[in-house]
Amino acid sequence: LAGNENRDIIHQLEYRIARLEGVLRLNKMITESGGKIFAADGKKADFDGTVEKCKEAGGSIATPRNPGENDAILYFVKYFNTYAYLGIKQSLIPGKFQLLNGAQLSYTNWYSNEPSGKGEE
């Protein structure tokens, strides 16, 4: 396509994406932090089902890597009044956690004496 046609198509796509994101924000289904979009539908699910749904949507389960991303996840916890699964797991060392791929965590924000596995982390 010619340069102007490409720009027109890109502009149309950007406009449509912005409209869709706006609708999802109005319906409290997405929030953003640092260029990443965080999404939730408020439905109860198990961990494996959550991981699979995230993959189906072209993303991955949320793993906070800084305070802004932590706040984006907390937004849904508060809005839906529920817990959130994170993309971390306990390592082979009890009380230590890592990313699902085994990499070391670079950011944590646990409450004092947490994680305890009792749901108050």
Image: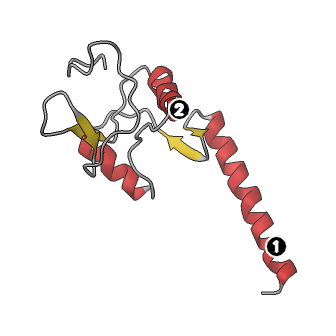
In this view, the residue farthest toward the top is: 112
Q: Foreground: 66 or 37?
A: 66
Task: Name the residue furthest bottom.
Answer: 1
Pick the residue in front: 70 or 37.
70
Q: Which residue position holds label 1?
A: 7
Quarter of the image that includes the N terminus: bottom right
Q: Point out residue 70 in the picture as x, y percentages from the top left corner.
A: 48, 30
Image position, residue 64 (x, y; %): 44, 36
Residue 96: x and y in percent read 21, 32
Q: Is residue 55 visible?
A: yes
Asked if residue 114 lies left or right of residue 35, the reply is left
As drawn, 96 above or below 82? below
Residue 116 appears in which quarter of the rendering? top left
Badge 2: how crowded within 10 Å, few (<14), some, or many (20+)?
many
Numbered tag placed on residue 111 in the rendering: none
Residue lying at 26% horizontally and 19% vertically, measured from the top left: 119
The percent position of residue 61, horizontal first and vertical second, equals: 38, 45
- Specify the amino acid type for callout 2: Ala
Q: CA distance from mark 2 to mark 1?
A: 32 Å
The earlier-in-sequence mark between 2 and 1 is: 1
> Local crowd at mark 1 within 10 Å, few (<14), some, or many (≥20)?
few
Q: Residue at x 41, y 41 (%)?
A: 62
- In the picture, which quadrant includes the C terminus? top left
Residue found 72% across the figure and 64% down from its top? 13
Q: Secondary structure at mark 1?
A: helix
Above or below — where is 61 with respect to 12? above
Q: Quadrant of residue 28?
A: top right
Closer-to-camera residue (74/114): 114
For mark 2, what is the residue? 72
> Measured along the vertical axis of the image, is residue 44 above or below residue 19?
above
Residue type at tag 1: Arg
Q: How is the image coloured?
A: secondary structure
